[in-house]
Image (cartoon, rainbow, N blue to C red):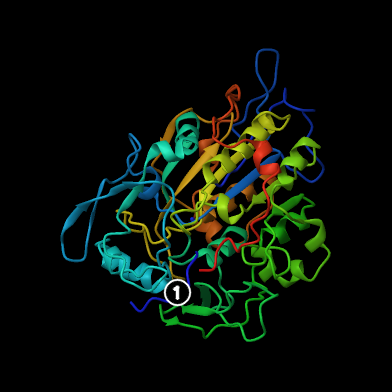
Amino acid sequence: MLGSQRFSAALVAVVLLSACSSGGSGQIPPGVAPARGAASEPGRNHRAPAQIQHIVLMIQENRSFDNLFGTYPGADGATSGKMHTGNVIPLKKVGLAALDINHTYPTYLQDYDNGNMDGFDLSKMGTGQRAGKYPYQYVDPAKIQPYWTIAQTYVLADHMFQTQGSGSFTAHQDLIAGGTAIDANDSIVDDPSSSWSWGCDSRPSTVTSLITTGGQYLFDQGPFPCFTYPTGTLRDLLDAHQVSWRYYTPPHKGNTDGALWNAFDAIPAVRNGPEWTTNISIPEKNIFTDITNGQLPALSWVIPSQVDSDHPQKLNSEYDGPSWVASVVNAIGQSKYWNTTTIVIVWDDWGGFYDHEPPAFFDNAGGLGFRVPMLVVSPYVVPGQITHTQYEFGSILKYVEQTFGLGSLGTTDVRAKSIASLINLNRPPLPFNPIPSERSRRYFMHQAPSYEPVDTQ
């Protein structure tokens, strides 16, 4: 999350799924277990179930469900919102460009207001001034048409909750580890104190904030942001089962390798090991080359540059997020990978924008957080489906674990409902139709790096 404020006083991702016996070579790569779809015995009059060989997770930035899909027909959205005064005001239709709103854990509690969801007007902007009516807005669908087209063509989930009511640092940790517990009593929450780096490359004086199992918020009382989680990360499970993975991330000027938005920069086994050069792929646009060259790994995390992330920054800035997502989806859809891949697109946190739906429950680590949009792209979904099932980031991790036979991290993946039920591997694959967008793959391949941190809050 952008902005100078780290503390207030008071979660496309794209998962590419699928595989069918008629797509590509029809063979499962070494170390990749077949997907656990509904049983269907192949025979003279039966089609063998598809097999998922690739999952691509695209992580966009800082948007609540109501901000992007509040007016989507049939979805659980809102066109008005409550203020702390009791007044109900209409959400204002705006473009995708926006200013940054504080969205730390204290702000989350303030917005939530004991389930009333009416404290958003008390939030602070990145400049420190009171937000007032600013969070009460939704994006004109015409400005994000690729997202709506993807929803109309594949699956939109309107009850995906971020793991913690916190910002981008912990959200990206949650999407590799399922949580941020560093011991039996404490979990990391919010962003590290340094705006220069969010991991092992941070300045030595950098600290983190904690939330205890009793719910106490310990601002800047946590350890240096270079962790070994007791349960490890998905990387450990993938490596143990020899399943390929890659983390596509943008470069960052004045630092090493996009460390602000690189979740694995906080994992010393990766940052200080050989996988930093083999599995961390910089820049993020390398995913296009890997698709073209037939080198797409089993699991991909795809992190956008700042201008392609949807992150609020400046009202006069370029916002190419919808085209960026469409271009990656199109690259996969028009390749040999379409019938062997699933695509999940998710936004990492609510960004301070209004959402009317209270979190589904509370745990002892600052969650669940607020709703964020999730899109699931696959040739094996019911086209145009809106799912009201309650999901969280652990639902995505659980699906990865199930697909590749990895076992469980034992974090939020245990309680979460997998998104696997959205995929019917026995149905004939949908043909791929390109998602129209303003920018093309060629544009992003030649786009100059911004070298700006994708997020600093």
**Residue, disc 1:** 5
Spot occupied by residue 241 in the image (x, y as percentages of width and height): 77, 53
Spot occupied by residue 398 in the image (x, y as percentages of width and height): 58, 51
Q: Residues within 10 Å of mark 1 (few under 14, many from 20)?
A: some
Asked if residue 238 shows in the view, the reply is yes
- Residue at screen point 63% across, 86% down: 205
- Residue at screen point 77% across, 49% down: 244
Q: Quadrant of residue 183?
A: bottom right
Q: Quadrant of residue 144?
A: top left
**Vertical relation: 171 (above or below) 340:** below
223 with respect to 122 (left or right) = right
Q: Quadrant of residue 425?
A: top right
Q: Secondary structure at mark 1?
A: loop
* Residue in front for this viewpoint, 74 or 331: 331
**Vertical relation: 143 (above or below) 407:** above
- Residue at screen point 66% across, 43% down: 444
**Vertical relation: 437 (above or below) 360:** above
Amino acid residing under circle 1: Gln
